[in-house]
Structures are given as structure tokens and as C-alpha cells.
Image (tube, rainbow, N blue to C red):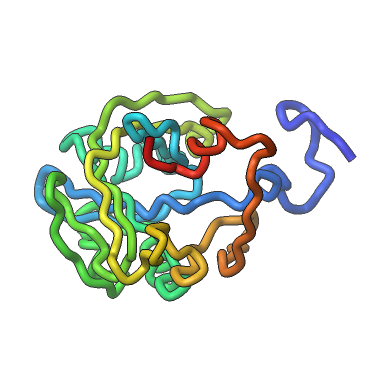
Amino acid sequence: MNYNPRSDERPLPYDPFKSCTVPRPIGWLSSVSTEGVHNLAPYSQWQNMTFDPPMVMFAANRYPDGRKKDTVVNAESTGWFVWNMATWELREAVNRSAQAFEPEIDEFIEAGITATGCVDAPGRRVAESPCHFECKYLSSQFFAGNSPVGGVDVVFAEVVRIHVKDEVITESGKIDIPQIKPIARLGYYDYCVVDDVFEMKIPGGGMAADGLEGRKA
């Protein structure tokens, strides 16, 4: 099977596009409006870009009427947002926060989770989450789609503060991913959980291998 998504009728009842690039990290992003309303929403189009300095990006499709998502508006207007790691234990809160609430609604309350303060960013973090990035807005780029919801805002930011709870750090100084059990987005309504990890080292080692591992210079 193959088809041109620009011109051909899709030969499957469900779109396979998002079910091929998997699993996708969840950008569970908190932000605050200029009016002081706290927002929390998950984005499955989220990724690290580079590490020196650490930079991230997320992409947010627009609403059917063409409006930007609240997270994009808040990041652009305040210059900040926070990434909170989405975990198996927090999956229901993540799902509740995916609803399209009105901008004046505090989504920390709607998601039923605890808010805690940041060091640099003006917003809040999810207290129950084990890892957070405080992200300083850099720029954004809009790409028009074939429909209003096809239009997407891509937001770029620098991570200026990293939070990791002590209890999820191993004796060797690494984050204990099997203990945390992060969740990731698949296609359709499907998700997965990371509870099994295996290691592969690049043959020959050297600087490239140390860079992948994140080893101190």
C-alpha cells in the first residue's frame, strides 16, 4: 500500500501518519497568561533539538476557527513555559488536561494535580511529576495547512533550569526511567509506557559515544 497524502484518497479507515512516527514524547506543558491564569496541556509533537545549550521545540495545531492554542499564546506573550514529564501514574491527569478548556480556566485544578512554583519561569510546575524543564521562549514559526486545524505553530525555547527529584536518580547518577515509567504517544487513541530499558553502545566508543550518554567532559 502507498498513497500521496496531498492528492490521493486515503486507502485506510484511520490515518496511518501519526502511527508511524512512534513513540512520541509528550510535551506536558504548563504556562501562565498575562492575566495570571494557569494553563496545562499535553502536546505529542514535542522534542529536544540540541544540548549545548539545551533547546526544545513543540508544535501546536490551531483550533478549527484558526485560533492559536493557549500554550502558544502564553509562551509568546510571557516568554516562558514549563515541560513536565508525563508518567504512568499521572496518565489520567494528562488525559484530563487534553480537553479544550476556555482560556480563563485553571487547568491545574481541572486536571486534579498539585501546582508548585518555579525558580525562573513565572508559571507553575506539576508537583507530582518527577522531572521538569523551565523553558525560555526563543521564537515561533507558523506553517499554513490545507485547513485551519492543519495550520501549526512551532515554538522554540531554551531550557534554562532542569528539575529532577532525588528519588528517581540512581546511585550511578542516572535518571531511573523504569522506575518513573514515562508515557509516550502513539497513533489513534493509543499510548505506551516505558518500563523496560536496554543498552547498546556504539562500537569503538570515543567522543561520539560519550556525547550520546551525556557523560561529563
**Residue at 38%, 55% in the rendered image:** 28
Q: Is residue 109 left or right of residue 2?
A: left
Choose between 145 and 185: the one closer to the eye: 185
Choose between 7 and 27: the one closer to the eye: 27
**Residue at 17%, 46% in the rendered image:** 33
Residue 187 falls in which quadrant of the image?
bottom right
Q: In this view, does 127 lie to the left or right of 152?
A: left
User: Residue farthest to the right?
Assistant: 1
Q: What is the count of numbered marks?
A: 0
**Residue at 44%, 49% in the rendered image:** 43
Choose between 205 and 85: the one closer to the eye: 205
Choose between 213 and 116: the one closer to the eye: 213
> Which percent across, then down, holds residue 198?
64, 59
User: Residue farthest to the left?
Assistant: 35
Reply above or below: 60 against 52. below
Reply above or below: 13 against 86. above
- Pick the quarter of the image with the N terminus: top right
Q: Is residue 1 left or right of residue 162?
A: right
Reply above or below: 48 against 42. above
Residue 7 falls in which quadrant of the image?
top right
Reply above or below: 13 against 76. below
- Pick the quarter of the image with the C terminus: top left
> Which percent across, then down, holds residue 176?
45, 65
> Which percent across, then down, holds residue 149?
50, 39
**Residue at 56%, 49% in the rendered image:** 24
> Which percent across, then down, holds residue 128?
29, 70
Q: Is residue 7 left or right of residue 96?
A: right
